[in-house]
Amino acid sequence: TPGLISLADIMAGVDDLDLGDSSDEENSDDKSKENDVNVKDKENTRTELPRSESLEKLIQSESSTKQEISPPIKKAPPKEQWAVQIDVSAPVDDFYKKIPNMAYKWPFELDNFQKQAILKLESHDSVFVAAHTSAGKTVIAEYAIALSLKHMTKTIYTSPIKALSNQKFRDFKQTFVDVGLVTGDVQLNQTAACLIMTTEILRSMLYNGSDIIRDLEWVIFDEVHYINDSERGVVWEEVLIMLPDHVSVILLSATVPNTMEFADWVGRTKKKKIYVVSTTKRPIPLEHHLYTGNSIKTCNELFLLVDAKGNFLTTGYSKAMEAKKERASKSSQSFGAKGTRQGNPAQDKNTWLSVIEMLKRKDKLPVVAFTFSKKKIEENSANLHSVDLTTSSEKSEIHVFFHKCISKLKGSDRNLPQVLQLEDLLKRGLGVHHSGVLPILKEVVEMLFQKGLVKILFATETFAMGVNMPARTVIFDNIRKHDGINFRNLHPGEYIQMAGRAGRRGLDTTGTVILLCKGDIPEMSELHQMTTGKPMRLESQFRLTYTMILNLMRVEQLRAQDMIKRSFSEFHNQKDMVVHRESFDQLKKKIAGIQNIECYLCSLDLEKYYEQCREYFQLQKHVQSKIFTHPVTIKSLSPGRVVMIRRPLGQAVLGVILLSSIGTNNARKYKTLIITEKGAENIKKSQTEVEPILTCTMFLPEGPCWQVVLDLVSDDIVRITTKVIKVDADGILQDCAKREIPRFSDDPPDRCVTTAAQELLRLSESNPSGLPGLHPVNDLKLRDIELVEECRSLQFLEEGFVDLNCTRCPMFQEHFSGHHRNMKLKDEFKRLQYLLSDESLALLPEYMQRVEVLKLLGYIDANGTVQLKGKVACGMGNHELMITELVFGGVFMDLHPTDIVALLSCFVFEMKRCAEPKLTDTLLKGRDHILEKAEMIGKLEKKVGMLTQVEDYKEQFSFGLMEVAFEWARGMPFSEITNLTDVQEGVIVRSIQRLHETLCDVRNASRLIGDRTLAQKMEEAIGMIKRDIVFAASLYTQ
């Protein structure tokens, strides 16, 4: 109807209705940067061809009589910087004047970055020190300990693994004497001024309100990059969040790209500045080589790949490739087309023999050879039975030390196959270090390596996370590893951490890193990325656990929602809260001042009209996305097809498709010739807002007609018309490309261009209301039932606008614009309200689901008060729900302590593939009980909406060590235990040690609920397993 709105024409091209429809993620960055949350005026309009304008722009008017609702919101004050970068290059000439009486002095001159950090410690400031391996980060830790001794306070040093805690205990004990150690199974001198512990122990102290925290001055977090660990990284975040305000932190890390970001999070969380002392200087520069030799004849095939200055040498790579090709050619002539196989055991042995010979000749021992398979380590060491690298005096020293270390073991344990094999290896200067090695033997290896008596150490990457144990050379047996999911190349950070073990400070001028090329040489791009790429960023691994939720509910010092808010994962969202709060307060005042539109016609149904607009746009956007991805539609948008494109001032302009192509993200792009006015060729930079109009009119140039070729996407196109015209698409594209070159910019357009433009102008003049469009069903033959229904719904919505009274108002345009601006304010107010609430937290839905599980199981009541079951679960170190359910379900009531030991082993043993154990009927029944409980909890989690798969939940419990645990509890010697399973000795020991911690948890739970019988059984069980080599004291604590 003339004079009434044709919404199909006006709104057909709208792609982005941003009235409460857009996601917070899309808006948050833009909104935080905008200082004016009001509708933008003409000075801040879109600067490119409007892509199917949003409703916001559709209804904005340029009427000179229109007034802004209120002045723009003032700029937010600059954000406080919590992370402060210290310039480590700046000399500290007055260091000893500033600290005349140092708390601790070293027999060597400190590096600049160490002095900078120590100055901050003297001011009781928190620091984040990021430096390479062996750069001297421990100096900062030592000074903090010395300060706490001077101040008569306490320092806690946390490490990611128990083995590192033991090593640090020995080192600090030699320096400071008053040092204690607290791990899961060892508590030494717990009242000491300096306590070494794992991060989990510190977390437990914080949850339980330990008295030690009151006197705490410093907490030192070593190996902070371990926060990237998917399983245990969350513990670092929990501890950092919960530490009291009076405690200062020292963060020690390998070099990472986002030190400032992480320090900013810690500072913002603790409300104190964190001073970042970061140095990329390596005390001993590294040289990286490729080794292609595989025999004594070729043992000198060592090619420099990255020099000491960090330059990647393509010439070295090329030489290595040539050496490989030359040998392959000779091998082909000698052994036929196939040549010798690479990577077989004999070839591996020859490669290692040749590289050892080369290392001896070049005086490059000792060596750490990183190998990413325990089986491969054992093979490599066994293959070198002919290698002997120690002198007779060294052999004697090794013999005496080795037997002194194992002297406290019982006779049968001293004669274990692994003990005898390792003794033979060590006497010849070889060592192995991986999780399958008995803990006491790993410590023997570490100590002999530090003494320089182990010349070649085959180790997994965990050896790279230890105390200072540098070698002259580091060798990579391979650069591919299995990360638990698939095989991949080493990440730069992993490679750098391990390679950093090369080079001994004070002994070597450079550290040597060698990559063995036993098979094909890796691609140059892969090697370049690995050796010179950036290490991995520190990323949040924060996740919710039932223990965390229950502990927070129990102590009531911090809500779980607050814990989530303060986590590193929510850091960027929470950073903007100050700005959001200010914007929110100002918007609140603005909304309070909004006046209703005084118009009889508009007051009847303008709001209804507005809401129908929203619904129309949302549905129209959905329909258009379907239409434009259909093959028939794509085919119709071929060269010559005339299309209508939304233009400023509410007009539509005709264009003709010249070329269709696939752009980024598989989105189609259309090169389109569009008519415009002479002098306004750069249509993308139009500064004119789109006006709301009641009819759709075609654009006609007021002056001379001109043309421009633009790249459009489907959202830019309002309508695919029924018209196809004849065009020379290639000619037009070539002519336009030529005239974009400055020296041809003034050339007149080619005839093929003007002909197409004149035809578009003619069509515009003869069709002032627009050309008819292709109908999705009748013309494009789209038969999708859902699409047909949606098209009908669009038509129904469009017809509904005709009967609304507000469209008859003579000032409808102005009233609608005013109402839209008011709604935009209210929508922005709602968005900020959401961002400022707990509802915006990404983990809140999971938190609510876990709380529901806890209520259903009776761990908390309806008010969130922790019940007895919940208090028991708080004390569990792992699998808190499962073990608590077993305790309260009476599963252990009629079992013998040995059976309980066997059943609980499934909660600490993690290997999935091992020999099937032989189980008694009692144990089989107990295993079924455990699987029943697991299925119950899995189904419950699924019921409340969690993404739990019941079978996956059940499969996390491994029963492969049940027989071993059962027989160990019955007193079987360890030498016989190893015959029951193919699980390696070191894994057995570690599992039984962890089992001891679980038994202690269940004993404590029994005491809490008053079950004396079960408590007595658990005491017996603990006594049964705590014996012999499994619980041999660490050599570092003796």
Image: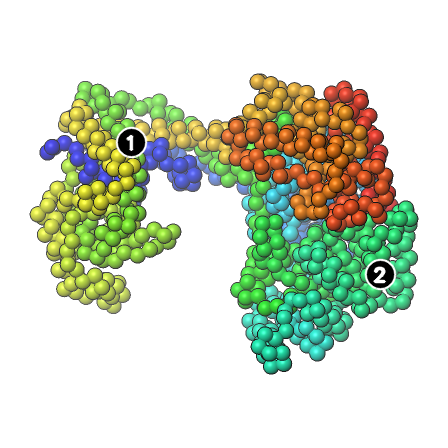
Rate crowding at label 2 as few (under 14), some (14 to 19) or many (20 or more) other CA atoms within 10 Å.
some
Q: Quadrant of the C terminus?
A: top right
Checking the image for residue 40, the label placed there is none
Q: Which residue in the rendered view is the most extreme toward the front?
A: 921
Whether residue 571 is situated above or below residue 346 in the rendered picture: above
Which labelled disc corresponds to residue 424? 2
> Which three-letter amino acid code belongs to the residue tagged 1?
Glu
The disc placed on residue 615 is 1
| Cα gap from disc 2 to disc 1, whole angstroms | 80 Å
Q: Quadrant location of residue 657? A: bottom left
Q: Which residue is drawn at 43% across and 39% down?
A: 25
Q: State the residue at coordinates (58%, 47%).
A: 538
Q: In this view, does 838 lie above or below 391?
A: above
Q: At 87% from the left edge and 55% from the top edge, which residue is drawn? A: 402
The amino acid marked with disc number 2 is Asp
Is residue 128 among the parts visible in the rendering? Answer: no
x and y, in percent, of residue 835 in the image = 45, 32
